[in-house]
Image: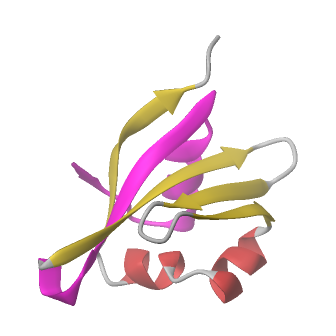
Amino acid sequence: MLQVTSIEHLKQLSNINGRAEFYMLLLGGLCRSSKEIHYDEQTKRFDIYNEIDDTYQSNLTEKALHTKTNIPEAIKNGVFYYHGEQLWGI
């Protein structure tokens, strides 16, 4: 488990050939919200799969990440963590 410290750190961790797995602690750590995130360095866009409600957010800019998700707030509050990665194939 690795705490994500910034949006730039999130980009580094999720700029892989696949989706990186993350989770956000909720209710003081009693619950967690799992997410699979991919960041494309070429397009500068995020794709996010939210496991908690089986929803997918695609083609998000960094600005949209701030307005359409609570990920930046979770990073700021120190409750967003990297869990591993799922590769799509090489």
Residue at 53% x, 63% y is 54
Whether residue 55 is situated above or below residue 13 in the rendered picture: below
Q: In this picture, is 17 found above or below 23?
A: above
Query: Which residue is located at x 73 percent, y 70 percent?
Result: 62
The span shown in magenta is: 1-29
The total number of labels drawn is 0
Q: Position of residue 19 (x, y in %)?
A: 56, 40
Q: Quadrant of residue 48?
A: bottom right
Quarter of the rendering containing residue 24: bottom left
Q: Position of residue 73 (x, y in %)?
A: 46, 85
Q: Residue furthest front?
A: 54
The colour scheme of the drawn protein is: secondary structure
Residue 37 locus on image (x, y percent): 56, 52
Q: Residue furthest top?
A: 90
In the displayed structure, 20 sits above or below 22; it is above
Q: Give the quarter of the figure containing the C terminus.
A: top right
Q: Is residue 56 left or right of residue 12?
A: right
> Where residue 12 appears, x then y in whole percent?
55, 45
Any magenta on residue 47?
Answer: no
Q: Nearer the viewer, residue 70 or 4?
A: 70
Taking 22 as reference, is 41 left or right? right
The residue sitting at 67% across, 75% down in the picture is: 65
